[in-house]
Image: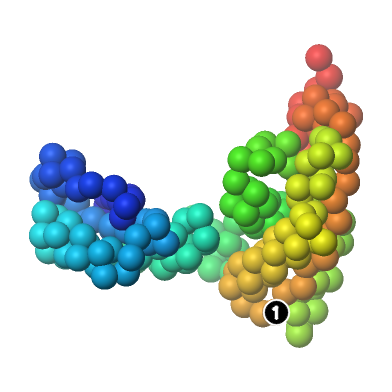
Amino acid sequence: MLLFVFASDEGIDKDICAKVKASGKPVVLAYNKIDKIRADEGENKLVKLLKLLPPDTSVVRMSAKDNFGIDDLIAALVRLLPEGDRLFPTDIVSDRPKEFVYSEFIREKCMRLLHAEVPHSIFVEIKSVDDQPEGLFITANIIVERESEKAIVIGHQGQMIAKISKYSEQALAGFVGKPVGVKLLVKVIPDWRNDVRFLQSHGLSGKDD
C-alpha cells in the first residue's frame, strides 16, 4: 500500500505521480488542504491528478489542520491492510493496560489540536476509570512543564481543554463502543521529563543512574 499525500494548493508534480503509478501498489490519495482552495478549483485539479494515478486509487478529501477527513483516511488505509494471524484473543485489543491506551488517546488529541505549541512536554496521567454498562468515565491530568504551557492547553476561557476533552470522548467512544465522559485537569510539574522519581512512578524509566 502507498499513501500519497497531496496538498491541493500546490502544483502537480508529474514525475512523482509517475513513480506512484509505477509502484504497482494500491494507492490512497490524501487530498489535503482543501480549505486552502476554492471547491471548484480543487475538484478540477483532483480530476487532473487522478488521470496520472492508478485507476483504482482511493481518494480522501481532507484538511489535516482542521481535523477534517482524518477518520476517513484511517478507514481507507485499514481497508487495504492485509489480514494476519491473530496474536491475541478477539476480546483483547492491546497488550498494554487500559489506562495506558486511554492516556494515549487523550495525548494524541492534545498533540493534534495543539500542533507545535506544546511539543513533547505533555504527559497524560489517568487518575480514575469508572467503567459502567451505560458508559465509561475517565478523569485524567494533562501534565506540562511550564505555566505558559498550561495556559495554552487550557486556552481562552477553557476552549482548548474543552475541545481536547470532546475529541477524546468521541475517539474513545468509537474504541470502547459506548458513551465516554472525559474530565481533564492541567498540572504543572517542572522538568518532569528529567525527574527520575516521577518517571519511575509512571513506568517511564528504569533504574537510577
Residue 116, horizontal then vertical, whole percent: 61, 40
Q: How many marks?
A: 1
113 up-or-down from 180: above or below: above
> Which image quarter is the C terminus in?
top right
* Image quadrant in which you'd find residue 58: bottom left
Judged left or right of residue 16, residue 132 is: right
Sort mark 1 into few (<14), some (14-19) or many (20+) by Cα contacts within 10 Å: some
* Mark 1 lies on residue: 179
Q: Secondary structure at mark 1?
A: loop
* Image quadrant in which you'd find residue 199: top right
Residue 123, horizontal then vertical, whole percent: 75, 43
The amino acid at mark 1 is: Pro
Q: Residue at x 29, y 48 (%)?
A: 10
* Image quadrant in which you'd find residue 55: bottom left
Q: Residue at x 75, y 79 (%)?
A: 135
Q: Residue at x 23, y 56 (%)?
A: 27
Residue 86, horizontal then vertical, whole percent: 45, 59
Kindly give the residue lying farthest to the top in the view shown: 209
Q: Residue at x 83, y 19 (%)?
A: 208
74 up-or-down from 40: above or below: above
Kindly give the residue lying farthest to the bottom in the view shown: 134
| Residue 84 makes an appearance in the image | no
| Residue 196 makes an appearance in the image | yes
Of the pair 62 and 78, the residue shown nearer to us: 62
Judged left or right of residue 73, residue 95 is: right
Colouring of the image: rainbow
